Image (cartoon, grey):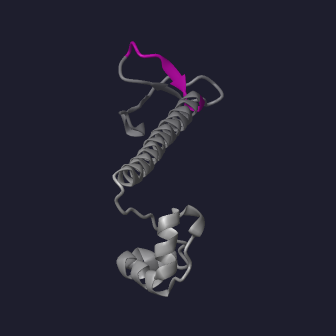
Amino acid sequence: EESDEDLQVSGDFPTGATQYFKIDDEHSPVITEETYHMIINKIEELEDQIKQQKEIEVLRAQIAQAKQDEQDLMNGFLDACDREEEACEIVLSLDDWQEFLKSGHLYVKQMMANTKEINFKTLKPKDRKLVEEA
């Protein structure tokens, strides 16, 4: 990659003081300073677009992985239900996400100790009886 210092300024300046740059050797085209800056700006614009596209691709891959993980979890629940094993899913609403990030295990433990809400609509009838007994 050539830097500004790598460019050689041609000694032949037409009237109007427009600077011309000769790039690399005598067979390279001569360009004006304005054209040079336009090219540099376009290169930077394209590099930004490439960077954004790569970031989008990473995000899409993360979304696809999250969807696959969720599907794997649901399949695990369904398999456990088919085998008549116990399975549960805990859905948390985080009141203090910073505290959760500091110590997720303790945060969840405290939430579980203080929570008395149970969503009956997702429980099977036999599980509802067990919850009512508890």
Q: Quadrant of residue 100?
A: bottom left
Q: How many marks?
A: 0
Q: Residue at x 39, y 75 (%)?
A: 104
Q: Position of residue 23 (x, y in %)?
A: 41, 24
Vertical order, 41 against 105 (above or below): above
Magenta highlight on residue 27: yes
Q: Which residues are magenta?
A: 26-34
Q: Is residue 68 left or right of residue 128?
A: left
Q: Quadrant of residue 8?
A: top left
Q: Position of residue 109 (x, y in %)?
A: 39, 81
| Depth order, front residue of 124/77 | 124
Where's the N terminus, which quadrant?
top left
Vertical order, 87 against 17 (above or below): below
Q: Residue at x 46, y 74 (%)?
A: 130
| Depth order, front residue of 27/93 | 93
Magenta highlight on residue 88: no
Q: Residue at x 39, y 12 (%)?
A: 27
